[in-house]
Image (cartoon, rainbow, N blue to C red):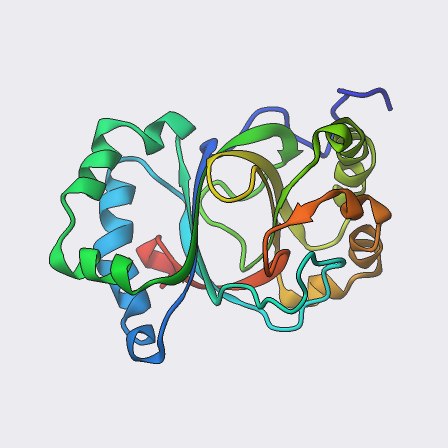
Amino acid sequence: MAIGTISESMDSAPRIGTGLLAVFCDLAPEWQSDFRPWLAEDMFPPRVAIGFGPAASFDVIEGAALGAVAEPQRKPQAYVTCYVAPTLGDLYGGPYQGLRTKRAPRDAAYHQRMQNQARYAAAWVGAGIEGDARHLAPVIVIDRFDLPPGEIQNFNIWYETEFLLACADIPGLKRLRRYLAMEGPERHLLVTEFASEQDLDGSAWRALRASGQWSRCRFAPGAPAAYRKVLDADPETR
């Protein structure tokens, strides 16, 4: 297949918004029980009201085998919350910035309680594998990394001509998207969504994770990591 050719199982046009806000964090034990009620009551509804969606919050899956890690001694953050915005520009527009500058007391307090936080505002880079337009899948794998300038072209060729094509045939893989971050500690994010945790044990997926191409990447501490969905922004799924 020639570079730039899209297979029938891939999508060159998005089915959901192209902006991504991903917030990773840890929390002290005393704040964990109210974390998801805060998201469900204070965070998701106003963002859905201005056009964000889908959105969900996830817990880390301990011990998931995901290939090489830059700093294996560093544990990934315990939580990640992802919001899909219509575009990257909507993460900087007036409606969303208004929510950020006029925080309710509970909202402001929780942002101070987050530990080891990493916040990314990023834009989708097609092509990819698209899925459910309403929800994020039950399990996600997130790669966060930088690439040395001399490695970018080789990684891009591998990603487009081998990795993406192989992912299109992996059972249980529901969506794969690549993002470039305008804000965040690392520039590159891959978000791969699966139907279940068991799908992470498939031989084809494990073979892709074992590729030496990942050695080109300078991963974030604790990355890559897998997460299971705990809370969805859609009230019908709670």
Identify which residue, 216 or 162, lies in the foreground. Answer: 216
Residue 138: give x, y in percent of width and height: 54, 60
Which quadrant of the figure has residue 225? bottom right
Left or right of residue 8, residue 177 in this image: left
The C terminus: image quadrant: bottom left
Quadrant in which the N terminus is drawn: top right
* Percent of width and height locating residue 180: 55, 33
- Left or right: 136 with respect to 204? left
Q: Nearer the viewer, residue 88 or 117?
A: 117
Residue 127 place in picture, x, y as percent: 65, 28
Numbered label tally? 0
Q: Nearer the viewer, residue 89 or 196?
A: 89
Instruction: Identify the residue at horizontal 32%, vertical 66% (top origin).
Output: 36
Quick check: 1 left or right of 174?
right
Q: Is residue 183 placed above or below 39 in the rendered structure?
A: above
* Residue 25 visible somewhere in the drawing: yes
**In the picture shown, does residue 156 fall above or below 53?**
above
Does residue 169 appear in the picture of this structure? no
